[in-house]
Image (spheres, coloured by chain):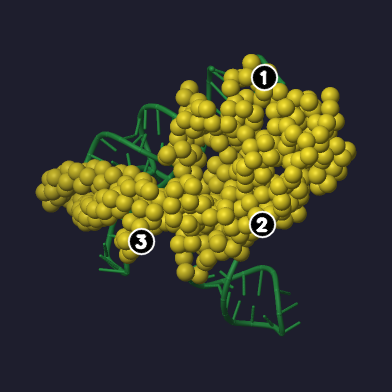
Amino acid sequence: MIDIKILRENPDAVRASQKNRGEDETIVDKVLASDDARRVALSEFETLRAEQNTLSKAVATAKGDEKSALLENAKTLAGKVKEADTKRAELEEIAKNNIMQLSNILDPSAPIGKEEDFVVIEHVGTPRTFDFEAKDHVELGKLLGAIDTERGAKVAGSRSYYLTGSGAMLEFALVNYAISSAVQAGFTPVIPPVLVNPSAMEGTGFLGQAAENVYHLEKDDVYLVGTSEVPLAAFHMDEVLPVEKLPIRYAGYSSCFRREAGTYGKDTRGIIRVHQFDKVEMFSFCHPDQAQEEHKRLLQWEKDFLDAMEIPYRVIDVASGDLGSSANRKFDIEAWIPTQNAYREVTSTSNCTEFQARRLNIRFKDADGTKSVATLNGTLVAIPRMIVAILENHQNADGTVNIPKALQAFLGTERFELV
RNA sequence: GGAGGGCUCGCAUAGCGGCCGAGUGCACCGGUCUUGAAAACCGGCAAACGAAAGUUUCGUGGGUUCAAAUCCCACGCCCUCCGCCA
C-alpha cells in the first residue's frame, strides 16, 4: 500500500510509475476521488457522533420531563449516526480497495520497460568451454544418483522430484553453508511456519496478481507459502520496532510451494521450475532512509554466495514491467547454465520500501513520531536451481562433479562420484 | 475430537450499562533530597487519525440500548484436563 499523503501531494508521480509498470494509471484518479469521499463521510460521521456523545451525557444527568425530551432527540440522532456510520464504512472499504490496487512507486533508477528490457549491471566469471559434450542436470542427477524426477512424477505429479544420496547431501551442505554465512553476517536464523493465515498472505501482497500461484487449503483457510518472505515479513506484523535495533535481519529456511499455473511447457525438464523446493531467504526490516543501501548489501551477500559456488553469473537490474507489485526495484542474479547456453535466474532481491510494512502495520518510533519501516528481501539460495548450476558448471567428462571448495567441508569430499 | 478457564494501557491486576479512555502496583522518564547511589517524596507516562475541535481503540466482528470494557451472539487466540498422534 502506498502512502495516501504522497499520492495527494504528487499524483503525477504515481501515474507515471503505474504507466511505466504497464499498469492502469486511471486508478490514481479513482483513489483520489474515493479518498475524498471517504474523508467527507468520515467527518460527517464524527460530527454526528460528537453530538451524540454530548447528548448522551446530558441524558445521564437529566430528570423527569427534561429527560424524556432529551431521549426523544437522542433516538432520532442515533438513527442518523448509524446511517452516517454505515456510509463511512462503505466508503472506507471502497477507498481501501482502490488504494490496494496501486503498486509501489518505482525507484527512479529502475530501468523502464518490459521483461526483456532489463539492464545488465555486471558479469562475473567466465562461462567455461567444455572439451566434451556437457550433460544437463537431469542426466548428471541420474548418473550421480542425486535427482529422481521420474519417481517424483510417479508419486507427486509433474514438477516433482526426489533428491537422493549426493543430491540430498548437497542440499544439506548448501543450507548449512548459507545459514552459517548469514549468521556470520549478523542474520538471525529462522525456521518459519509455511502454513499461514489469510492476513499474512494478504499483507505481503501475495493474494493480488500472484494469487493463482498460491496453494490454498480451503477446509482450514490457510495457505502454503511460496517463499519464507511471507512468514518473515509477517513476523513483526502490528508491531512497533525499536529504532536502535534497525536493521533487523532474518535468514529464513523453509520449503516453498508454487502452483506454477500458466507455466505449462516452460522448463518442463528437470528441476528448474518445481512445485516444492527449499530456500534460504534473507529478510530485512530497516529505516526507510537506509533501504537503498540495504538493498545493495543484500545483493552483495547474494553475489558472495555465487562466488563461493564458483559459478559464472550476471547481475541484472529488472525492468519496471517485470517487478512485483511490492517492489520498487529488483536485482536478479542469473547463473550460467551451460546446457541451455544461457543465464538463468537463481536469486533475486527486492526493495519493498514501506509498501509492505504499511499493509502489515510494522512501524518504528523516533523523535518525529511513528512511521513505517522499509522491508527488503533477497534469496540467499534456492536449492534446486543452485543444484542445477553446480552440477552443470562443475561436471567432468565422465559425469562426476567437482564440489566447490566452500562446500567441501560440509560434504567431506571434493567430488561427487557416479553410483 | 470432548470438558472447563481466560483475553483491559510494557508487565500484573481493578472495573457498578452513564461519574471509564479506564483505577492501582511494578517497570520506565523527569525532579526534590544525597558527595554519588538506593530509599522516600513530587510530577509524567497507551495508541491511531486530525491544524484544531474532535473521533476511534478494553481479542475480532455483529447485535441490544439514547448510551457498552460492562448485556447478548458468532468467531479467533491462549491456558488446564481427557482422548488421539509425529
Residue B20: percent from left, percent from top: 35, 53
Query: Label 3 is found on which chain of the structure?
Result: A
Q: Earlier in the sequence, mark 1 or mark 3?
A: 3
On whether disc 2 and disc 3 are found on a single subunit, the reply is: yes
Residue B16: percent from left, percent from top: 37, 42
Residue A220: percent from left, percent from top: 49, 25
Given the image, on which type of amino acid does mark 2 rest? Gln
Given the image, on which type of amino acid does mark 3 rest? Ala
Describe the element under mark 2 as helix, strand or loop: helix
Query: Label 2 is found on which chain of the structure?
Result: A
Quadrant of the image occupied by residue A82: top left
Residue drawn 72% across the image and 53% down it: A125
Comparing B84 with A189, the one in front is A189
Residue drawn 35% across the image and 53% down it: A19
Describe the element under mark 1 as helix, strand or loop: helix
Comparing A159 with A67, the one in front is A159
Q: Residues within 10 Å of mark 2 (few under 14, many from 20)?
A: few
Residues at marks 1 and 2 touching, judged by CB atoms closer than 8 Å? no
A25 relative to A284 in the view: left or right: left
> Which residue is label 1 attached to?
A150
Residue drawn 62% across the image and 44% down it: A343
Could you tell me how many numbered marks the image carries? 3
> Which residue is label 2 attached to?
A300
Colour yellow maps to chain: A
Colour green maps to chain: B
Asked if residue A361 shows in the view, the reply is: no
Asked if residue A263 shows in the view, the reply is: yes
